[in-house]
Image (tube, rainbow, N blue to C red):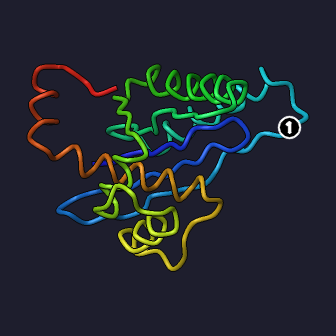
Amino acid sequence: MVVLGIDPGYAIVGYGAIYFHNNSYRPLGFGAITTDADTDFNRRLEIIFDKCSEIIKKCKPDALAIEKLYFQSNQKTAIKVAQARGVTLLAAQKQGVPIFEYTPLQVKTAVTGYGKAKKPQVMEMTRRLLKLSEVPKPDDTADALAIAICHTQASGTYLRQQMMKSDIHLR
């Protein structure tokens, strides 16, 4: 199974594609889509859409896993991230890639076994599971890989299999 993980944003969108087979992981590619702060916001969304579309075409994922939005304070930032996240989802939808969403708690639990794990713990486990020499930078890239790993863990569960059979998707 090939999973493309996405850590949404509008300045930096982390992405990571992994291949998962027989409880073994292999990174296929990862990085970050960046947009400049002085670029018109609508142009930034276009850049994110175009680059996500290219990545999806290149890695041909069986699933796109993306982090659910969670914001405590800044609504203006939340709205912009939501818009950027929307164009990412549109890129996947237009290419027929199934979309799955996970909370930070679900990602931490899947990667480390502990829902209250700190960011460095999640990043280190991601590095170990993917047998990388170092934690990918920027952090958004490591987060995207962790989100992809989370999907591989969730996709094998009995609940997920039953939901897929009945065409109910976790979104």
Q: Residue at x 44, y 21 (%)?
A: 93
Q: Nearer the viewer, residue 59 or 144?
A: 144
Describe residue 65's horizontal placement relative to residue 76 as left or right.
left
Residue lying farthest to the bottom in this orientation: 133
Q: Position of residue 114 (x, y in %)?
A: 31, 61
For disc 1, the neighbor class at 10 Å (few under 14, some 14 to 19, many from 20) is: few
- Using the rendered view, name the quadrant where residue 7 is placed: top right
Q: Residue at x 55, y 29 (%)?
A: 88
Q: Residue at x 73, y 44 (%)?
A: 34
Residue lying farthest to the right in this orientation: 38
Q: Position of residue 71 (x, y in %)?
A: 57, 34
Describe residue 89's horizontal placement relative to residue 50 as left or right.
left
Q: Residue at x 28, y 62 (%)?
A: 113
* Residue that numbered label 1 is attached to: 37
Q: Position of residue 45 (x, y in %)?
A: 70, 26
Residue lying farthest to the front in this orientation: 73
> What amino acid is labelled 1 in the image?
Ala
Secondary element under disc 1, as helix, strand or loop, is loop
Describe residue 8's horizontal placement relative to residue 170 as left or right.
right
Q: Nearer the viewer, residue 131 or 135?
A: 135
Q: Quadrant of the C terminus?
A: top left
Q: Nearer the viewer, residue 27 or 70?
A: 70
Q: Tell me: residue 123, above or below residue 141.
A: below
- Using the rendered view, name the quadrant where residue 13 is placed: top right
Count the marks.
1
Q: Tell me: residue 121, above or below residue 51.
A: below
Describe residue 145's horizontal placement relative to residue 110 as left or right.
right
Q: Tell me: residue 61, above or below residue 23.
A: above
